[in-house]
């Protein structure tokens, strides 16, 4: 039986459109498919929360695939190894509290486990703005990454969510868009984005969990976005905090679901 080029195109377009229509209304929408965003999505979907991720890049993983300075290895501390185990990621002990994993395997496993749990990832799409109603985040405004890169004026589309997560890393792009809106006050010491601190792995890994929380009604921050918003240090190619931050955000939201947060 032969293959027809137009039939191939139809299959791609029709199936993609089904997914897009299905995920225009979700429980949780996440901007960024880095390690924190993928981990949060996995635990949410695993617990029956309808979850979508919008990733502006061609690939998932954020800064994880590049490891440290393009040496494709990452380090996690002991507390995060239980997440590596659950994801089926191999790792080895370097010394006490320092465990090494392959960054490509880790990225692939996080992506695979999230998708298998029911998460839908739309790559090459980004969150360019937010929807707020009654002083609460209620949706994301999305567009193709290529539109921004080409400096085109093309109006976006919107998706509705009951909670959103900024997992955009150092840029904390979703919170930045929120901050620009009049009368918006964030849940930070200044009411604004405080700004990322200089490299300090120990402090950054400690504070990332403290900073993983609701920054504005309906919007949560995870991973490096959390440290950037709350003004604590970056930590380089140690990724345990990213994984633990993603899991913590999922746990917070799941508790909200079970206490009728979404009703």
Image (cartoon, helix red, strand yellow):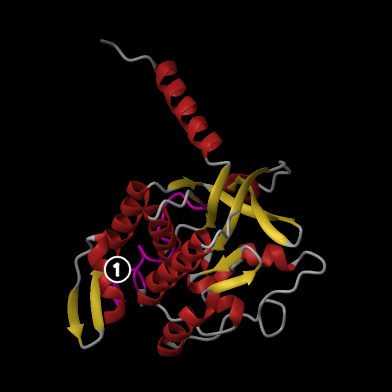
Q: Residue at x 29, y 56 (%)?
A: 109
Question: Taking the image as drawn, is residue 77 in sight?
Answer: no
Q: Residue at x 53, y 56 (%)?
A: 30
Residue 184 % position (x, y): 77, 69
State the residue in front, 9 or 204: 204
Q: Which residues are magenta?
A: 53-77
Up-down: is 105 above or below 79?
A: above
Splitting the image into 4 quarters, where does residue 105 fall?
bottom left
Give SS at disc 1: helix
The secondary structure making up most of the magenta span is loop
Residue 88 % position (x, y): 22, 60
- The quadrant of the picture occupied by the N terminus is top left
Q: Residue at x 53, y 79 (%)?
A: 211
Residue 10 forms part of the magenta stretch? no
Residue 5 % position (x, y): 40, 18
Q: Residue at x 45, y 64 (%)?
A: 250
Judging by the rendered image, the residue that carries numbered circle 1 is: 83
166 left or right, relative to 137: left
Q: How many marks?
A: 1
State the residue in front, 248 or 91: 248
């Amino acid at each position: 039986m032969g293959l027809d080029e137009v039939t191939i195109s139809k299959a791609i377009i029709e199936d993609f459109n089904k997914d897009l229509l299905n995920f225009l209304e979700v429980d949780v929408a996440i901007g960024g498919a880095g390690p924190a965003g993928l981990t949060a999505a996995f635990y949410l979907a695993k617990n029956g929360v309808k979850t979508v991720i919008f990733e502006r890049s061609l690939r998932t993983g954020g800064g994880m695939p590049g490891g440290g300075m393009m040496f494709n290895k990452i380090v996690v501390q002991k507390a995060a190894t239980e997440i590596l185990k659950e994801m089926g990621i191999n790792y080895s002990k370097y010394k006490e509290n320092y465990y090494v994993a392959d960054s490509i395997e880790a990225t692939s496993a996080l992506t695979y486990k999230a998708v298998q749990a029911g998460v839908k990832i739309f790559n090459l799409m980004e969150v360019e703005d937010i929807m707020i109603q009654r002083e609460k985040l209620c949706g994301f405004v999305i567009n193709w990454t290529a539109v921004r890169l080409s400096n085109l004026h093309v109006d976006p589309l919107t998706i509705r969510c009951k909670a959103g997560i900024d997992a955009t890393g150092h840029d904390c792009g979703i919170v930045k868009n929120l901050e620009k809106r009049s009368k918006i006050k964030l849940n930070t010491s200044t009411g604004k984005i405080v700004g990322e601190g200089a490299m300090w792995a120990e402090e950054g890994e400690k504070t990332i969990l403290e900073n993983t929380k609701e920054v504005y009604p309906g919007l949560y921050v995870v991973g490096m976005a959390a440290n950037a918003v709350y003004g604590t240090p970056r930590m380089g190619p140690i990724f345990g905090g990213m994984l633990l931050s993603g899991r913590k955000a999922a746990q917070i939201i799941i508790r909200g679901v079970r206490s009728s947060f979404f009703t």
